[in-house]
């Protein structure tokens, strides 16, 4: 092992999945700090998540080459470290990076031991107490670094914010609510105020998503909230995050390339509702509605495999994979994503239920894997939990179709000539008209709708 006294410039590494840029969210060190090999030095936001980037070098920080909030391309200088750089350890680091081992990036959020150096406050931030100075009897639970950044920029102490997230986690919406409460309590409005960009994440669709019975994808904090100063009088300028910029490219490409069409149908889900309720026990809630729906979608895709495909424009071919990786839209802390249940085509209803619960829980906090985020072959979008009935969603390119489910509510329905209350939902199906015609799309939609209306018989046939 050799050591040399030199200055090493670390370039922003390839963060995977073909991503070419990242936004610097928060530096964990400052110029002059001493760092060790593999110590996290900066939090960056990509189109998929927020990750900590560790240093391959040891020594004293000489230059930070990008400011917080700045967009940086992969391969551009990130940080320069002067001092003793251990050649063998740094070489192992670079080998791991090139191999994509996953050891290079520590993951989503901030680990307990991260950042041995000083942490810098964002420029222009008001006086706030350090987040780390929290009494032992009042631990602050924060998963997303963006939440901490928003609180700092708004001049808020996280200890004063009432958490509403699972397990007492402070979410973005909690920060916004605290800012709004402080603004209402004070006479003049502050120079900066939080505004919501209302962006959609990198995965799909203009529809938001939540599971009607909290079993699957859930509505979380909205994406794109930032604190910005007013620009020209009468307007505010809201910079898109790296996540939103990537989303804009995906959605624009979908709209530009795909001649989409939409069909929809009202469905009587009473029998499915009753089946789900009958499967519940005091110790086992049984499969959720989303799991049953996923099973029916998978069955429909086996009958109409052209909808579980992508279009190769260069060769004018429809490419149908051997597997069904069922994407499910999830509203996470960064925005809307559609990670996939890998191998959903071979799963039972119970297995799908477990896989969906695990996947959506991880996706909400940015912990879906790169493969799950990119391997989907068809997307299921359950937006009913947001109390809306329908949506003409945008297809998740390069997929060719997306199925949406609205809220399930009691409505008057005609059964055997009598008007009776039934649990009705609306299904919308958006498809690429280049790969199939309306008859195929309608056939698939009816196959799922018929299974929802008569689930016992459908499950027997599966």
Image (cartoon, helix red, strand yellow):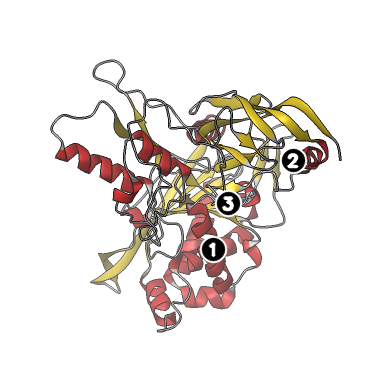
Q: Nearer the viewer, residue 197 or 212?
A: 197
The x, y position of residue 436, in whole percent, is 59, 45
Mark 3 surroundings within 10 Å by alpha-carbon count, few (fewer than 14), some (14 through 19), many (20 or more):
many
Q: Nearer the viewer, residue 426 or 349?
A: 349
Q: Which mark is residue 170?
A: none
Q: Nearer the viewer, residue 456 or 24?
A: 24
Q: Which mark is residue 358?
A: 1
Q: Which mark is residue 97?
A: 2
* N-term-proximal mark, 3 vs 2: 2
Q: Which residue is mark 3?
A: 378
Mark 2 surroundings within 10 Å by alpha-carbon count, few (fewer than 14), some (14 through 19), many (20 or more):
some
Of discs 1 and 2, which sits in the foreground?
2
Tag 1, which secondary structure? Answer: helix
Tag 2, which secondary structure? Answer: helix
The x, y position of residue 260, in whole percent, is 51, 39
Residue occupying the point 57% across, 27% down: 31
Tag 3, which secondary structure? Answer: strand
């Amino acid at each position: 092992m050799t050591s040399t006294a030199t200055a090493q410039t670390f370039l922003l590494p390839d963060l995977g999945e073909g991503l070419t840029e990242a936004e610097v969210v928060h530096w964990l060190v400052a110029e002059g700090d001493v760092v060790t090999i593999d110590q996290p030095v900066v939090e960056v936001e990509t189109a998929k998540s927020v990750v900590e980037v560790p240093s391959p070098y040891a020594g004293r920080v000489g230059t930070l080459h990008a400011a917080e909030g700045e967009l940086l391309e992969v391969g551009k200088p990130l940080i320069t470290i002067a001092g003793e750089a251990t050649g063998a350890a740094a070489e192992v680091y670079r080998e791991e990076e090139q191999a994509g081992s996953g050891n290079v990036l520590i993951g989503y959020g901030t680990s307990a031991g991260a950042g041995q150096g000083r942490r810098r406050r964002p420029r222009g931030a008001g006086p706030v107490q350090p987040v780390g100075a929290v009494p032992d009897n009042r631990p602050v639970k924060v998963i997303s670094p963006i939440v901490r950044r928003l609180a700092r920029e708004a001049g808020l102490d996280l200890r004063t914010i009432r958490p509403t997230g699972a397990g007492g986690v402070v979410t973005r919406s909690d920060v916004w609510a605290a800012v709004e409460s402080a603004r209402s309590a004070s006479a003049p409005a502050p120079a900066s105020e939080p505004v919501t960009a209302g962006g959609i994440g990198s995965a799909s669709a203009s529809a938001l998503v939540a599971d009607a019975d909290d079993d699957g994808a859930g509505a979380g904090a909205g994406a794109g909230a930032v604190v910005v100063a007013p620009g020209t009088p009468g307007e505010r300028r809201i910079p898109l995050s790296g996540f939103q910029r990537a989303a804009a490219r995906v959605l624009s490409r979908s709209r530009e390339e795909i001649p989409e069409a939409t069909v929809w149908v009202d469905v009587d889900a009473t029998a499915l509702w009753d089946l789900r309720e009958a499967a519940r026990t005091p110790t086992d809630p049984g499969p959720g509605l989303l799991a049953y729906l996923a099973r029916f979608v998978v069955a429909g895709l086996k009958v109409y495999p052209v909808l579980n495909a992508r279009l190769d424009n260069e060769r004018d071919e429809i490419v149908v994979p051997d597997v069904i990786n069922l994407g499910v839209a999830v509203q996470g802390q960064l925005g809307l994503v559609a990670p996939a249940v890998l191998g959903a085509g071979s799963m039972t209803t119970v297995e799908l239920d477990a896989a969906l619960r695990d996947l959506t829980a991880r996706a909400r906090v940015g912990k879906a894997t790169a493969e799950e985020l990119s391997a989907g072959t068809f997307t299921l979008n359950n937006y009913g939990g947001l109390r809306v009935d329908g949506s003409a969603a945008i297809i998740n390119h390069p997929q060719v179709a997306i199925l949406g489910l609205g809220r399930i509510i009691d409505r008057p329905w005609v059964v055997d000539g009598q008007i009776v209350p039934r649990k009705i939902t609306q299904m919308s199906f958006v498809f690429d008209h280049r790969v199939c015609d309306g008859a195929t799309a309608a056939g698939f939609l009816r196959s799922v709708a018929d299974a929802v209306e008569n689930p016992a018989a459908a499950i027997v046939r599966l």
